[in-house]
Amino acid sequence: MRITSVETFVLGDRRLLVRIGTDSDLVGWGEATLETWVGPVAAVVRQMADYLVGEDPRRITAHWQVLSRGGFYRGGPVMASAVSGIDQALWDLAGKRFGVPVHELVGGAVRTHVRLYRHANVDGRIGDPVAARALADDGYTMVKVAPTEPVRFIDSEQTMRRLVAELEELRAAVGDAVDIAVDLHGRFSVPQSRRFLDRTEHLGLAFVEEPLRPEHSALIGDLVRSTSTPIATGERLYSRAEFEPVFRAGIAIAQPDVSHAGGISEVLRIGATAEVHDVQLAPHCPLGLVAFAACVQVDAALPNTAVQESMIDFAGLLDDDEHAYVFNRGDWMPVDGYLRVPTGPGLGLEIDEELVRARATEVAPSVGLWWSDPRDGSYVEW
């Protein structure tokens, strides 16, 4: 078997699919979406295609090594996301070749179902109690929320009291049986995060995510040691090497993104390394069904997977035009917040290639890159 084509399909600023064709009737699909930067990633995939065409698609690890390490410059979100989409597609091909899901090729499933969590955000506050209660009523045992307004390096007592009060209202809405995770999106400084963690310990949060920007990962151990609240990070870390310092710093939850951190191959290795440090995984995935399916294959195979993120509206998935390019959407419907481990070959998806080609655009959409604090006009983290 030989690779005959590597194609990219831009379906939006949060959707970049990769298709690998072969000289057989088998095709592999992956998702290389890098939010707001799909154009550069698509260009890198096209350049990597020069190496891949003519190669044996079964040599997944060998291709990963060449694409990740073959040039003098390597790493970073753009190149790692390109490798991720290709890697997913190669694993999809491998599973289809043998007629089994990807997780069977890497040791088999360690669980029958994957626990999911959903977001309960609303503009102007940290979490929506009504949305969170609705998710709990649907059977979800974890919800995640995030602050939606800028936070200064050290913000006012008024801001702190408001954040705590809103989280207390959220806890009252869902009760103690539902886990609450808070994503700070790297908006907080070390001192502001320390204050937030101290003031929210009584809420028993499942974890606080990205309390610092990824470039400040060397400081995350200070926060781990300052609180009993589990610390999570990793959606903007792209390799085992980048995760190693935060593992040693004592984080509780690692959040690699299967579409950013080197694909299925590298996330499996990140997960194995995490297990050595008694760290669990909650893979990052605010993307589409292809990326989600790749995550679920990893979740099924890794013993230290805790929970899986998704922003897909499963209640409306069967009628969802955004994911109409997946024929078997019904196979991806969770029940009571848990998704049964898929049994279909490869990633387990049936792709409507004709619709993908019809919807693809040549030019990546333009998106805003500037978020400012309305109080002084300065740049703030998203």
Image (cartoon, rainbow, N blue to C red):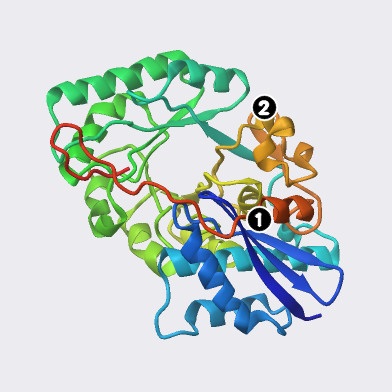
Residues at badges 1 and 2 in contact (C-beta under 8 Å)?
Answer: no
* Observer able to see residue 239: no
Separation of residues labelled 1 and 2 (CA atoms) = 26 Å
Which percent across, then down, holds residue 312? 60, 37
Q: Is residue 315 above or below residue 37?
A: above
* Observer able to see residue 181: yes
The kind of residue tagged 2 is Ala
Q: Is residue 25 above or below residue 301?
A: below
**Quadrant (top left/top right/bottom left/bottom right) for the C terminus:** top left
Label 2 crowd bin: few (<14), some (14–19), many (20+), radius 10 Å = few
Which percent across, then down, holds residue 329? 75, 40
Disc number placed over residue 315 in the picture, else none: 2
Disc number placed over residue 301 in the picture, else none: 1
The quarter holding residue 107 reads: bottom right
Left or right of residue 54, residue 181 in this image: left
Which percent across, then down, holds residue 164? 27, 22
**Quadrant (top left/top right/bottom left/bottom right) for the N terminus:** bottom right
Q: Secondary structure at mark 1?
A: helix
Instruction: Compare residues 136 and 259 and report the one nearer the observer.
Output: 259
Which percent across, then down, holds residue 286? 52, 44
Label 1 crowd bin: few (<14), some (14–19), many (20+), radius 10 Å = many
